[in-house]
């Protein structure tokens, strides 16, 4: 089958030499150059083009998976907060108040031997963790640790009175004092008072004796002048005489603590300094040690 020759386009293919000779005329004019028409839209394109987006399909799936994981983690956190209930509220309150871990009180069953420790633990926890709570909330929290033994009946009565509005506490400390009167009895106070009357300073420093005296005085029933008299009796005689001979006699128990501690500290520092100086003289060939010790300050006993 032969190919049919069709009409030529306006552009004829010629050699470069013919183009140079024929394009210029004698008048110097330039012959028009015609090119083939551009391909129509129906013509197939053989040029490979890149996809219309910069992100590969693998990266797109990775981002979707990461977003799904983040959503799952957020949903788990929300569920944990909802499940926390009251415990979550207490945790947020603790975060606002700051501080480290504070031990909660042990369950109180009404035993008179445990009432002092229970009250101290409640006071500390409320001061550190529940200062912003209402008195009603604080009292309810204390009652949640009153369980078993002889305390159950008392707890039920108190809760009924609170719900009926028959009693109302202005502070949590007032409620704890009521609890102490109910379960403390007179046994603990008598034990504390007897311990207080036996205390003596002896060879202890005044700081040590004051701390011991304060622990025994707490809950003993002693206060004011009787408490001062017991402290005067317990400290060493030398310190007591110096304080009694002072122009301004201590008025309160806190002043007795402070001034007695200062006297005891000064005497001990003076004694250490004299011993140091005596030891230095002895090394330099001074008097015998026994004679030098006669110059040491006398113990305040």
Image: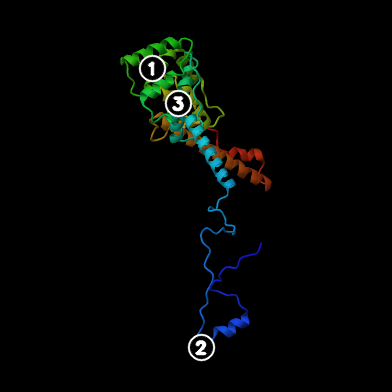
Q: In the drawing, does residue 35 fall left or right of residue 17?
A: left
Give coordinates of residue 31: x percent, y percent: 52, 81
State how far apart marks 1 and 2 are (Cα).
126 Å
> Residue at point 63% right, 39% down?
291
Q: Secondary structure at mark 2?
A: loop
Give coordinates of residue 64: x percent, y percent: 54, 42
Q: Secondary structure at mark 1?
A: helix
* Residue bearing mark 3: 85
Q: Earlier in the sequence, mark 1 or mark 3?
A: 3
* Residue bearing mark 2: 28
Q: Residues within 10 Å of mark 3 (few under 14, many from 20)?
A: few
> Residue at point 53% right, 30% down?
208
Q: Single out the residue that lies furthest toward the bottom.
A: 26
Query: From the viewer's perspective, is the residue at label 1 or at label 3 nearer?
Result: 3
Q: Nearer the viewer, residue 29 or 158?
A: 29
Q: Earlier in the sequence, mark 2 or mark 3?
A: 2
Q: Earlier in the sequence, mark 1 or mark 2?
A: 2
Give coordinates of residue 14: x percent, y percent: 61, 77
Q: Residues within 10 Å of mark 1 (few under 14, many from 20)?
A: few
Check the image and tell me how it is coloured. Answer: rainbow
Query: From the viewer's perspective, is the residue at label 2 or at label 3 nearer?
Result: 2
Q: Single out the residue that lies furthest toward the front.
A: 1
* Residue bearing mark 1: 178
State how far apart marks 1 and 3 are (Cα).
30 Å
Q: Nearer the viewer, residue 42 or 6?
A: 6
Q: In the drawing, does residue 20 fall left or right of residue 238?
A: right
């Amino acid at each position: 089958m032969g190919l049919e020759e069709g009409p030529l386009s306006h552009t004829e293919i010629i050699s470069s030499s013919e183009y140079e000779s024929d394009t210029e005329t004698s008048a110097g004019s330039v012959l028009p150059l015609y090119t083939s028409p551009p391909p129509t839209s129906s013509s197939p394109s053989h040029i490979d083009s890149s996809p219309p987006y910069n992100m590969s399909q693998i990266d797109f799936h990775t981002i979707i998976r990461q977003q799904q994981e983040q959503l799952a983690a957020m949903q788990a956190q929300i569920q944990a907060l909802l499940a926390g209930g009251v415990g979550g509220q207490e945790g947020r309150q603790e975060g606002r108040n700051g501080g480290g871990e504070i031990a909660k009180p042990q369950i109180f069953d009404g035993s008179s031997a445990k009432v002092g420790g229970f009250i101290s633990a409640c006071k500390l926890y409320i001061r550190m963790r529940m200062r912003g709570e209402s008195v009603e909330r604080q009292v309810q929290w204390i009652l949640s640790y009153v369980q078993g033994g002889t305390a159950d009946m008392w707890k039920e009565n108190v809760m009924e009175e609170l719900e009926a509005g028959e009693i109302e506490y202005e502070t949590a400390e007032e409620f704890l004092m009521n609890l102490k009167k109910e379960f403390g009895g007179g046994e603990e106070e008598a034990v504390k008072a007897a311990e207080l009357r036996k205390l003596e300073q002896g060879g202890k420093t005044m700081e040590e004796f004051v701390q011991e005296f304060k622990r025994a005085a707490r809950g003993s029933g002693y206060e004011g002048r009787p408490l001062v008299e017991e402290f005067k009796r317990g400290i060493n005689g030398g310190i007591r005489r110096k304080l009694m001979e002072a122009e301004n006699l201590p008025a309160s128990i806190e002043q007795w603590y402070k001034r007695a501690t200062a006297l005891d500290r000064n005497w001990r520092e003076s004694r250490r300094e004299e011993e140091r100086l005596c030891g230095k003289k002895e090394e330099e060939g001074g008097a015998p040690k026994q004679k030098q010790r006669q110059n040491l300050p006398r113990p305040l006993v």
